[in-house]
Amino acid sequence: MRSGGCFCGAIRYEVGDAEYPTANCHCTMCRRTSGAPFVTWFVVPNAEFRYTRGEVTLLESSNQGKRYFCNQCGTPIACITSVHPDVVDITLGSLDEPEALTPKFEVFTETQLPWVHALE
């Protein structure tokens, strides 16, 4: 079992310990909602993810996605898209041991900032 949560500790979650698909997302929504040049997500089947403490705040960032944040410190935790409603995308940085997973691919590279270099 892996665990993670927000900066202030109000939100905690658990996921399995599989080698989940992990990607850097360069879309403008990820950039704006995180304040970072890109967000690294890992993708978990809904059945393998659960909140263990706190309640997240929902932001419907588009008609295709719902983003979940800590309502106390603002840490982005998760995203569920209408395209893949059976999985939850979780921010790698919110994992207690983010080094456990490595990004293997990148998405929305057409909006990637020019000074961000591709994975090699």
Image (cartoon, helix red, strand yellow):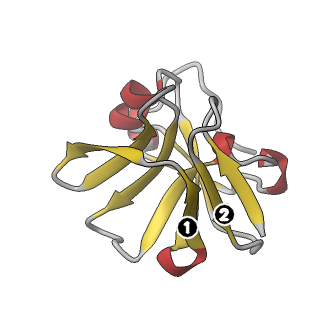
* Left or right side of 30 for 82: left
Residue shown at the point (41%, 53%) measured from the top left: 79
| Identity of the residue drawn at 67% across and 40% down | 93
Mark 1 vs mark 2, CA separation in Å = 6 Å
**Element under disc 2:** strand
Give the percent coordinates (x, y) of residue 116: 60, 26
Q: Is residue 98 left or right of residue 52?
A: right
The answer to which of marks 1 and 2 sits earlier in the sequence is 2
Furthest residue to the left? 63
Q: Residue at x 47, y 32 (%)?
A: 112
On screen, residue 56 above or below 117: below
| In the depicted structure, whether residue 46 falls above or below residue 81 | below
Per the rendering, the mark at residue 14 is: 2
Residue type at mark 2: give it: Glu
Expressed as whole percent of the image width and height from the top left, the position of residue 119 reads 70, 43
Residue 51, percent from left and from top: 54, 60
Task: Relative to 73, say whether 109 is above or below.
Answer: below
Q: Amino acid at mark 1?
A: Arg
Residue denoted by label 1: 50
Q: Position of residue 64 (x, y in %)?
A: 22, 56
Q: Which mark is residue 3?
A: none
Would you call the spot at circle 1 few (<14 residues within 10 Å), some (14-19), or many (20 or more)? few
Residue drawn at x 37%, y 60% as measured from the top left: 80
Q: Are marks 1 and 2 in contact (CB under 8 Å)?
A: yes
